[in-house]
Image: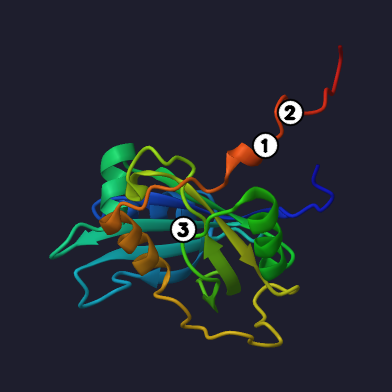
C-alpha cells in the first residue's frame, strides 16, 4: 500500500506530430483552445544526426508539448514513434511530484523503477523543472515505439527558479539524446518490476455492491 500521494497532477502532455502538421495542431491549441505559446524551437539539436521540433503551449494548470522528428543522417526516435502510432499521438504524460529525488529513491526501492537517465534541471518551456524519463510501459518493442512516463518537480510558484541548484543543468546527455540512444541500442526494459506485485493483489472495492 502507498502511504504517500506522490502524483500531484498532470504537468504536461507531449504529442508526437509530423513536421508538415505541427502548425495545424499549434493553430488548434493556440487560436481555438486558448493556449499561450511559451517555447518554439524548430531544431533542438542543430548539426546532429537527428533532431526534433519542440513547441510548448501553456494552459495555466497544464501544458501541451508538440514534438516532430527531424531526420538527417539517422532517423529520429520521434519519427519512429509517429510511424508506429500516427500523427498527434501521445508519447508521454508528465506527472508532477513534490520531491523528485525522494520520489525516485522510493520508487526504485519499492517498485524497481527503471529510469532512462539521470534527473536533469533546466527550463523546459513551461518554467524551471527537474525532470526524468522512465523506461517504457512495454518491453516487447523498441523503446522508440513505446509510450513512457515523465516525472517532474517544479518550484512552489510557477515561473520561479529553484532556490538552490544541487546538480548541473547540463547533467547527462539531455532528454533527446537519452531517448535516441535507447532506440539505437534497442534497450527493451519495462518501467517497473511487476514481479514485486503481491500475488492476488486487488484494488479496494468502491461504490455500490
Of badges 2 and 3, nearer the viewer stands 2
Residue 113 placed where, x, y %?
Answer: 59, 53
Looking at the picture, does residue 191 appear above or below residue 177? Answer: above
The label number, if any, that marks residue 65 in the structure image: 3
Q: Do residues under tags 1 and 2 come within 8 Å of each other at their CB atoms?
A: yes
Left or right for 9, reference 36: right
- Name the residue rendered at 26%, 52% in the picture: 79
Looking at the picture, does residue 77 appear above or below residue 173? Answer: above
For the residue carrying disc 2, how many other residues have a C-alpha within 10 Å: few (<14), some (14-19), or many (20+)?
Answer: few
Residue 100 placed where, x, y %?
Answer: 67, 67
For the residue carrying disc 3, how many other residues have a C-alpha within 10 Å: few (<14), some (14-19), or many (20+)?
Answer: many
Residue 91 placed where, x, y %?
Answer: 43, 48
Distance in Å between CA atoms under marks 2 and 3: 36 Å
- Name the residue rendered at 41%, 73% in the picture: 174
Left or right for 119, reference 17: right
Q: Which residue is mark 1?
A: 197
Q: Which residue is mark 2?
A: 201
Distance in Å between CA atoms under marks 1 and 3: 33 Å
Res. 127 in view: no
Amino acid at each position: 500500500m502507498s502511504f504517500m500521494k506522490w502524483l500531484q497532477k498532470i504537468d504536461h502532455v507531449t504529442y508526437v506530430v509530423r513536421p508538415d502538421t505541427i502548425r495545424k495542431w499549434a493553430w488548434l491549441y493556440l487560436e481555438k483552445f486558448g493556449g499561450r505559446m511559451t517555447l518554439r524551437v524548430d531544431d533542438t539539436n542543430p548539426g546532429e544526426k537527428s533532431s526534433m521540433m519542440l513547441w510548448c503551449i501553456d494552459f495555466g494548470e497544464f501544458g501541451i508539448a508538440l514534438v516532430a522528428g527531424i531526420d538527417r543522417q539517422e532517423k529520429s526516435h520521434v519519427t519512429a514513434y509517429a510511424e508506429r502510432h500516427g500523427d498527434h499521438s501521445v508519447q508521454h504524460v508528465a506527472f508532477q511530484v513534490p520531491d523528485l529525488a525522494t520520489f525516485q529513491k522510493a520508487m526504485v526501492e519499492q517498485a524497481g523503477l527503471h529510469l532512462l537517465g539521470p534527473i536533469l534541471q533546466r527550463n523546459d518551456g513551461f518554467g524551471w523543472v527537474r525532470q526524468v524519463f522512465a523506461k517504457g510501459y512495454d518491453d516487447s518493442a523498441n523503446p522508440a515505439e513505446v509510450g513512457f512516463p515523465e516525472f517532474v518537480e517544479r518550484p512552489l510558484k510557477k515561473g520561479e527558479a529553484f532556490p538552490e541548484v544541487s546538480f548541473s543543468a547540463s547533467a547527462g546527455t539531455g532528454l533527446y539524446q537519452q531517448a535516441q540512444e535507447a532506440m539505437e541500442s534497442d534497450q527493451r526494459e519495462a518501467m517497473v518490476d511487476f514481479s514485486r506485485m503481491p500475488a492476488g493483489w486487488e484494488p479496494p472495492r468502491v461504490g455500490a455492491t
